[in-house]
Image (cartoon, helix red, strand yellow):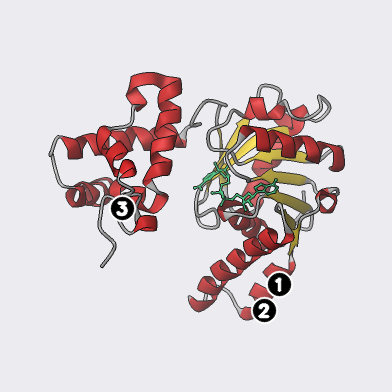
Amino acid sequence: MNARKKIGIVGAGMMGSEIALCFARVGYLVSIKDATLELAEKGLANVSRVLDKSLKKGKITEDEKVEIISCLMPTDNYGDLSDADLVIEAVFEDETLKKQIFSDLDTVCKADCIFATNTSSISVTILSTAVRKERIGQFLGMHFFSPASVMKLVEVIPGIDTQNETVDIVMNILRSIGKEPIRVKDVTGFAVNRIFHAMLIETCRLLEEEVASAEDIDKACKLGLGHPMGPFELMDILNNALNLEVEEILCNTYGERFRPRPNLKQRVAAKHLGRVTQRGWFDYSK
Ligand SMILES: NC(=O)c1ccc[n+]([C@@H]2O[C@H](COP(=O)([O-])OP(=O)(O)OC[C@H]3O[C@@H](n4cnc5c(N)ncnc54)[C@H](O)[C@@H]3O)[C@@H](O)[C@H]2O)c1
C-alpha cells in the first residue's frame, strides 16, 4: 500500500482523530466519519490543536500543517469510505454499536478493504462476526495507545478467521506511519493492558499496606524502573473510573489476580477520578 492510498476512520473522538493524524502526516488520504458532520469536524479541530502544539515547538512548519489538514476529510456519510483500502473503527466501547458499524461498512466498502477495530476490551473474533464471510479474513484488531500520535506501539490482533496476509499488510502499513506493531492473541486485555493493570493493582496494594506514599511509589517507578511517569500520576490522567472498568473486565475473565483494589473503588465512588475532576490520587485544585 503506497502513501496515497485511502484510509477510513469511523469515530472522530480522542483515539480516532489522533489515529487519523498518524496517517495524514505521512500523506495518506483519510476520511473521518462520525455520527454527524459536526462531530467529525470536532475531530479535525482536535487534530489541528495537536498540530498547533508541534508548530509551537518548531517540529513542523505552517505549510506542513496545511498539507496534513488537507489530507483529512470529515464526513457523516459511509459513502465517502467506499473506496478506502483500510477502515479503522474507533467509536464508543459498545459491542452492539461496533457490530452495527461493521455491518454497515460491509455493504459500502470495496471487496478488498481491510477492517480494523481499535477496541480495548471486546473480542476481535466476536466483532468480526458482524461482516460477511467473504470479508472475515480481512478483519482484525489494531489497538493504538493514547495519545496515538505519540505512542509508537500498536497491538495487532488477528481473530480466529483473520488471514495471515491481512496481518502482514497491516503490519507494513503501521511501519509506514512510523509505528512498531506487535502481534497479539485475541484475549481479554490483549497483552499491554494485562501487564499494565497487574502493575496498577500491586501499586494500589502498596499504598493500602502503607509500604510507601503515592508520591514515593511514583518516584520509585520513575527513578528505579525508568518509567517516564509514575503509576498514580498516570492513573489520574487516564481517569480512575476507566481504570476500574478495565480491571473489572479483566477480573471477569481471569479472576482474583485482576480484582480491583478497594482504594481504587473508593476513589471512584468519591468521584476522585483524576485530573478530569481536579482530584484523584493527587489534588489538582490548586
Ligand atoms: N481512550 C483510550 O486511551 C483508548 C486507548 C485504546 C483504545 N481505545 C478504544 O478506542 C475506542 C474509542 O475511544 P475514545 O477514547 O476515542 O472514545 P471517544 O468517546 O473520545 O470517541 C468515540 C467517538 O465515536 C463517535 N461515534 C459514536 N457513535 C458513532 C457512530 N454511529 N458513527 C460514527 N461515530 C460514532 C462519537 O461521536 C465519538 O466522537 C474505544 O473502543 C476504546 O475502547 C481507547
Residue type beneath disc 3:
Glu
Where is residue 23 shown, x and y percent of the image? 67, 56
What residue lies at 50% left-to-right and 78% top-to-bottom? Answer: 56
Q: Is residue 182 left or right of residue 30?
A: left
Name the quadrant containing residue 185.
top right
Name the quadrant containing residue 144.
top right
Residue assigned mark 3: 233
Q: Is residue 255 left or right of residue 116?
A: left
Residue type beneath disc 1:
Glu
* Whether residue 75 can be seen here: yes
Q: Nearer the viewer, mark 3 or mark 2?
A: 3
Q: Secondary structure at mark 2?
A: helix
Where is residue 217 shown, x and y percent of the image? 21, 46
Tell me, for residue 67, which label it has, or none.
Answer: 1
- For residue 159, above or below residue 150: above
For the residues marked 1 and 2, what is the alpha-carbon distance in whole angstroms? 6 Å
In the picture as drawn, the residue positioned furthest to the front comes out as: 270
Q: Nearer the viewer, mark 1 or mark 3?
A: 3
Q: Are marks 1 and 2 in contact (CB under 8 Å)?
A: yes
Residue type beneath disc 2:
Asp
